[in-house]
Amino acid sequence: MGHLTTEEILKSEVVLSVEDLVIKFNLRGKELTAIRGASLDLHKGESLAVVGESGSGKSVFTKSFMGLLDSNGRIENGTIMYKGENLAKFKTEDDWIKIRGKEIAMVFQDPMTSLNPLKIVGKQVQESIELHQNLKGEEAKKLAIEILADVGISEPERRYKQYPHEFSGGMRQRVVIAIAVACNPNILICDEPTTALDVTIQAQILQLLKNLQEKYNLTIIYITHDLGVVANVADRIAVMYAGDIIELGTAEEVFFDPKHPYTWALLSSLPQLGTKGEALYSIKGTPPNLFKEIVGDAFAPRNPKALKIDFVSRPPYFEVTPTHKARTWLLDPRAPKVDPPPMIFKMRDMGMNGGANNE
Amino acid sequence: MGVQTMNNNKEVLLEVKNLKVEFGKKGKEFVAINDVSFNIYKGETFGLVGESGSGKTTIGRAIIRINPVAGGEIKYNGKTISGKIDNELDKEITKKIQMIFQDPMASLNERAKVDYIVSEGLYNLKNYGSEENRKKIVEQALLEVGLLPEFASRFPHEFSGGQRQRIGIARVLVMEPELVIADEPISALDVSIRAQVMNLLSDLQARKGLTYLFIAHDLSVVRFISDRIAVIHKGKIVELAESEKLFANPLHPYTKSLLSAIPTPNPRVERNKKIVIYDPCCHNYENDPPKWVEIEPEHFVLANESELESYRKEIDYKMTLVN
């Protein structure tokens, strides 16, 4: 299905490199640290999923690649390197125009709100072609119809002239994807692309994105909280918690051999792993307040098995394999051996049997 | 929970019979729910699954008398509660059947304190006795959903999504209901908070003997929490069975399609999954219209004669595999 192997990911060039990124917001006179020193290398042609709960910073992190931070937010520290330029230093809209759409494009969550209700669908696709591909008039229209057909809209000539309200939710999301692809970007960021859709439609949209990835040679970042979607599309997974990437690895590494206690907890709380009639595993407490400075491991207060050092000093990344690293003191050679919860073993067994959970 | 074992002595709490709900003006009405029948047993969790627009919420709303019924009837504890009913029964139903809503950000009054939000039902029925007693009831309800009694003096915006949903549940508990209609109660919540709220719902059910009608689109959640599941498609229930039976042995093509699309948190399974696409054209209902049939004990399906025949073969085949 076009999924990259570990070797292929390591071999392919890095298209976007984020280093030690710190993003802060001014909110009600106080300062909130939304991203606390996150680093990430994005490889060409891969599908990377950024997973995390609301407020973990997954949207802010990726929006900073396109200069889409709200006006009260700023990049305090760190670099975002893309084609030899540091995007973190960009100040004006003119700088960003060169990147947005043409290099990095975005598919938003809710197709009900991301289309212009007063404009026919075809024109909205054509608009991004005219802006980014130097085509005008009839030529641009021809290409727009072609792209509408590419994203699986039947009778594209007729549909070209229709308004968004004449489309169903799934079809609208196809149009949103068409607009993003029409810019001919290198990197496509999909922010919760299927959250607003029904499961049957969701599966179709994910398949479409995979097909387009191959056809247009795209590198895709998926932002999502749905671990089912992640399992379907991701080559690699970055798990975010409290503004930081706490674990990064290939899909199989993160699902079957997770190392960070937060990843353990997140996977364990899935209803698919629960036993009927028993309580589901649930994470106690709430995420930390990002207005305050976080000392040590951000997840420690919610982790019943936290080590003493977790409350004192922030863990560095420990490498598990060349593609897998995690920010937890448990990986330090001096740390006591702590076993993951039983659900993680259950998950691994299911995975190795290739889907015995669908019995 | 655990209703599978009480098959023989189950007591019907809610009976929905040939329910029909219509919207729009006379002459060009839109039939949202057409000829739907099912029973909910006392103490069970009945899951209702379907896509958006399938009518699952409409059924819930018809039961609590928000949407008028155009045909058929709904019986609660043997008494008809659809259509015109007298004031006293109306009051009783309002108390006995309560609803938890999907989005805790939208369903709580932003300008009211938690104390008022939780007591609103009590104020309506004026059945709480003294003011002191009301405060006690609110306090008790907040404790029961895992919140602190001090929270009563705060406003909804001071709480997180999970906490707000707990307030929504506390508001239901003060009425001492028997049947709770939970309309996508965890869809708007984060994964880790979902588990907390689901545990709370099961816990309350065990302690208070509540009956749930659990409406959702996420099949993996419904499977975990429900004793029986009904699958609804375009205003018609197409299949109804005990949860594990439905997952092990789906018969209707729409159920099969829905089950095949469930996302599994497992990369190896996901990458090789085949999605079954449901095409309503596969039914040939022109000369042989479908009926709602109990094809095996406690397993209902909407099918015509020729389909029933092939479904029966399917069941027999599965049985031979098991033995």
Image (tube, coloured by chain):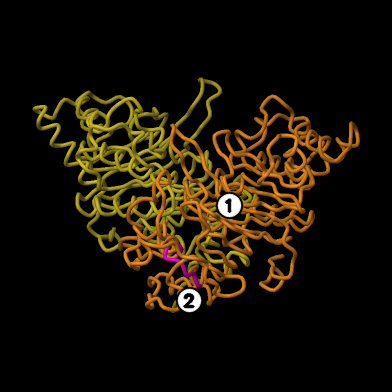
Chain colours: A orange, B yellow
Chain of residue at mark 1 = A
**Can the viewer see residue B78 in this picture?**
yes
Amino acid marked by disc 1: Leu
Report which quarter residue B268 is drawn in.
Answer: bottom right
- Which residue matches tag 1? A21
Q: Is residue B30 left or right of residue A90?
A: left
- In the image, what residue occupies the spot 72% across and 26% down? A119
Circle 2: residue type: Asp
User: Do marks 2 and 1 share a chain?
Assistant: yes
Find residue A349 and name its label.
Answer: 2
Q: Nearer the viewer, residue A234 or A276?
A: A234
For residue A300: magenta? Answer: no
Looking at the rendered image, the disc whose residue lies closer to the viewer, 2 or 1, is 1
Magenta region: A257-263
Of pointers 2 and 1, the one earlier in the residue sequence: 1
As drawn, which residue projects farthest toward the top?
A: B26
Of all chains, the one bearing label 2 is: A
Q: In the figure, residue A132 lies in which quadrant?
A: top right
Residue A95, position as x, y percentages in the image: 74, 39
User: Compared to A35, does A325 lie above or below?
Assistant: below
Q: Secondary structure at mark 2?
A: helix
Q: Quadrant of the C terminus of chain B?
A: bottom left
Q: Residue at x 34, y 58 (%)?
A: A301
- For the residues marked 2 and 1, what is the alpha-carbon distance in whole angstroms? 37 Å
